[in-house]
Image (tube, rainbow, N blue to C red):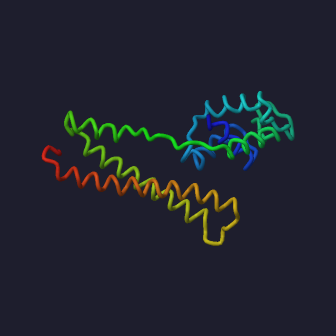
Amino acid sequence: MSLPHAILTALLEKPSSGLELTRRFDKSIGYFWSATHQQIYRELGKLEAEGLIRTLPAEQPARGQKKRYEVLPAGRAELARWTAAAQDPRAMRDPLLLRLRAAAVVGTAGVEDDLRRHLELHRRQLAEYRQIEQRDFPPDRDAPQDRLRHLVLRAGIDLETFWTQWLTHALAEFAGLPDAD
């Protein structure tokens, strides 16, 4: 449901080809809304058919040239409508938490090692987010658009901070369990 809106956002920031969008998803939007190359191209076709985006005319027609897309007024209006609409928070569905619950009844074999693995992954992601913050959001970068983009990044930083703290606590609890590995 939100992939079309993620694409509209990215195209409003900068008209792009499908390949450029895929690369931008990998470097920014994909941190909080992932999509495969195929999903992006499929959605571009739908958005174009719905009259929300259009293919930009080629500067010099050439065979095999990448299509570049831009958002039409109807696409901007749809994104504005979606942005203004109220949405309920999503219920958390985390397999790790479910596995911990299951471990209470079937035993903890393998769980502690996976908690350590998760901790390392979250620490790496947190470090990456902090590098992005240092690089892209110096103190003098205070335009409203930058402040909102920074707010999204801060959500990622805060979530990774939560997970690293929680996983550290979970591992400490595991150390005190009688049948922990």
Give 4 or 104, whichever is nearer the viewer: 104
Residue at the spot x=67%, y=31% of the render? Answer: 43
Q: Is residue 115 left or right of residue 153?
A: left
- Residue 118 image point, x, y percent: 35, 47
Residue at the spot x=26%, y=45% of the render? Answer: 113
Please identify the quadrant where the C terminus is shown: top left
Q: Is residue 133 left or right of residue 161?
A: right
Residue at the spot x=17%, y=45% of the render? Answer: 180
* Image: 133 above or below 107: below
Give 86 or 7, whichever is nearer the viewer: 86
- Residue 62 image point, x, y percent: 82, 34
- Residue 152 image point, x, y percent: 58, 55
Q: Is residue 98 left or right of residue 72?
A: left
- Residue 83 image point, x, y percent: 68, 46
The answer to which image quadrant residue 169 occupies is bottom left
* Image: 160 above or below 19: below
Residue at the spot x=76%, y=45% of the render? Answer: 15
